Image: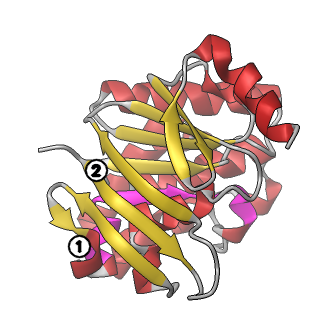
Amino acid sequence: MRPLEIKDLHFRYEEDMPWIIDGIDLTISRGEIFSVLGLSGCGKSTLCYCMCGIIPHVYGGILDGEVLIFGEPAAGMRLPMISTKIGIVFQDPDTQLFSPTVEDEIAFGPENICLSRSEIGSRIDESLEITGLGQYRLTHPEKLSGGEKQLVAIASVLALRPEIIILDESLSQIDMDGRERIKETILSLSNQGKTIIMVEHDMDNLDIADRVFFMGEGRLKEINRDRIGDIFGLYRGR
């Protein structure tokens, strides 16, 4: 069973608005690093929200078509259940981090699904090891660099052990060293069988992707790496 399938998906926020997503069909495999590239405002984040259930469970609108998470319609699943299957890391880590220590931040999700204390401790240790943040366990996230904060956000998602992880322009505000650390973590997760969806507007962050799709006019089109610049230039010129 594929981790994520999208079938003839359409979405707009208001009845009199154009479709932001206009007929997307997509299947993503286990362990794949899948990337969506597009200009700012093209609907990439809206697509992320549909994938992880924020639409329709949090944000309303007109939704047609279907998103299947391991064969189950996302629209019929409760958000706590979705969060154990698919997690999302946003562009600005400061919008996701609010606890006094890295350890507390990672523990927040498992605590909210009522796991035992021993299980929560195990998941904290596991997430710290994967992201290489063990030395910052008791550090306040505000004292960390941008790349380290983003790794904390990733660790917090990993603590729920989702099989699918969405990174919504999560590298956009990170310096080169931070990007390389996060890319190494992404490759490690992919090798463990996790499915990674990278949503980007920066072509330089796509070197680790298995497939790259361009989003424009509400649709996705698979592109070869050597044509990315040409397609970007075409849309920028409109």
- Amino acid found under the numbered disc labelled 2: Leu
Badge number at residue 4: 2
Residue reaching furthest to the right: 237
Nearer-N-terminus badge (2/1):
2
Q: Where residue 131 appears, x then y in whole percent?
A: 52, 38
Q: Are marks 2 and 1 in contact (CB under 8 Å)?
A: no
Looking at the rendered structure, the secondary structure element under dot 2 is: strand
Q: Residue at x 63, y 59 (%)?
A: 43
Q: Which residue is mark 1?
A: 116
Looking at the rendered structure, the secondary structure element under dot 1 is: loop
* Nearer to the camera, 47 or 197: 47
Q: Please indicate whether residue 115 sits to the left or right of residue 35 in the image.
A: left
Q: Where residue 91 appears, x then y in whole percent?
A: 70, 55
Q: Considering only vertical position in the picture, is 68 above or below 194?
A: below
* Nearer to the camera, 214 or 192: 214
Answer whether residue 116 is visible to the viewer in this image.
Answer: yes
Give the magenta range.
80-94
Neighbor class of circle 1 (other Cα within 10 Å; few <14, some 14-19, many 20+) is few
- Amino acid found under the numbered disc labelled 1: Ser
Neighbor class of circle 2 (other Cα within 10 Å; few <14, some 14-19, many 20+) is many
Quote the CA–CA distance across marks 2 and 1.
29 Å
Badge number at residue 208: none
Q: Residue at x 38, y 62 (%)?
A: 9
